Image (spheres, coloured by chain):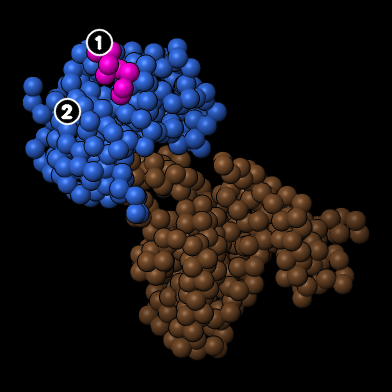
Amino acid sequence: MRTLLELDDLEARYGPVQALRGVSLTVGEGEVVAVLGANGAGKTTTLRAISGTVTRSGTVELDGKQLRGGPEAAARAGIAHVPEGRGTFVELTVTENLRLGAYTRRDRKVKEDIARVTEYFPWMTERGGQRAGTLSGGEQQMLALARALMSRPRLLLLDEPSLGLAPLIVREFFRIVRELNENEGLTVLVVEQDARIALQSSARAYVLEVGRVALTGRSDKLQDDESIRRSYLGY
Amino acid sequence: MVIAAFADFMQQIVSGIASGGVYAALALALVIIHRSTGVINFSQGEMATLCTYIAWTLTVNHGWDYWPAFVATLGFSFVFGVATHRVVIRPVERGDLLRVVIVTIGLLIAINGFVVWQWSGEPQALQSPFGSDTFDVGGVIVSVQDIGTIVVTIGIVILLWLLFQFTKVGLALRAAAVNPTEARLVGVRVTWMLALGWGLAAVLGAVAGMLTAPSVGLDPQMMQPILIYAFAAAVLGGIDSPLGAVVGGLALGVMLNLIGVYVDFVGAELKLPVALLVILVVLVVRPSGLLGRPEVKRV
């Protein structure tokens, strides 16, 4: 498998607090990789460092090319980052959110793509004019995913998609992510608090502890290892 | 007698709408900047005055026809607005909003000083593109100047609305205003969008200035009362609502005109205090304005 994303010795800090202390990881093309760990382990910061939302040191390479600059540059390089807590523009409509997802694209196939993407979310077609802020939490999370897909990303970053959602909706969300991975070869790096669903949905996983990679392996192996589950994943 | 009184009343309404259109344009400029930068641009009026002097220089000193000068002035004002954001506002934008407010007040003084230095404080006459003709609609005497003012402001407002609603850059402008962090994640260059907003606001101000100058005379202080009316219009309509700015501007124009004519003790001199009273009453009774949404802060 070709390596799409490679992080080498990534560090990041918020003021005096060092959140990442040298994280190295890889994501292969077409792979779904999970990042797990307790609160404050550096999961969200890892994604923010990749998209340039926080200042970082160390290297981030996408397809062999080193990324520089902030989130605008990352978006142009093909990274779609769905941040924690519903990445939608609540004051804009569903359709406007989707159009914004395609902002970095220069081609004129945005309308066709809205039709293609909303096949995964049939309810969106009839509610295109509705303001995103009036959607339910689950619908907003789906919209954030749909908007990310509109950029035709090379790499999708998902930050805690399960946060605050009912278990049924979380399962539906991850089902769609798996489907996108299988049908369209979408590459995903997902950060999750809910280790169980993340391991079920990914091929490999990294476990972070205080800003470092504590453990890595195939998701099915991690799932089966009871001592690992107990000491790192808490279920 | 009754008919004459009614015709007079209608006349006041029409000229109220015309001056209200000018307030609406400047109020819209304030709203655009407030939505994206989060501050009131106190130099909005002086920026408009400067742009109007450019139009005056082009027509009087360089012999341009009115409309080419009008368009060139809009072009100048756009570049001027963008440059003001890039050079003066952007360096202080991070952190306390009060710093930006103080910088816009500084700009007010600096631009006013520049205008006086460059063009002297003497009042000048900017020609009206609409002439001073009037016509009679069923007893109501309407001036072409008023109708022209109404048509131009409505035209500009509609163009802006189309830009914001139906173009990619308009969508990006709105996205950058409501949620800059998120906008950057989808690839919007937010700082440029803010600069673009300043450019559009300056264009609106230039329109307001060029429409004001023929009737009140062009001088360095020309836009200062208009800015107060624009504040009142923006507050009345809702400081974050573009539609509110337009409605507020028109309503205020009509209201002030009627009060000035029919309430004896107010007259023309007390219009400004009435506008301030409007600001005060709205802020106390309905701080979000007629069309604004009450601000809900998530904690």
- Quarter the N terminus of chain B occupies: bottom right
Q: Mark 2 sits on what residue?
A: A27
Work out which residue is located at the far right of the displayed protein and give it: B1
Sort mark 1 into few (<14), some (14-19) or many (20+) by Cα contacts within 10 Å.
few
- Number of dots carrying numbers: 2
Q: Which chain is brown?
A: B
Left or right, residue B101 beside residue B255: left
Q: Mark 1 sits on what residue?
A: A224
Query: Please, what is the three-letter code of the amino acid marked with disc 1?
Result: Asp
Left or right, residue B169 beside residue B284: left
Residue range corresponding to the magenta coloring: A223-232
A229 part of magenta stretch: yes
B33 part of magenta stretch: no
Sort mark 2 into few (<14), some (14-19) or many (20+) by Cα contacts within 10 Å.
many
Q: Which chain is blue?
A: A
The answer to whether A148 is drawn above or below residue A176 in the figure is: below
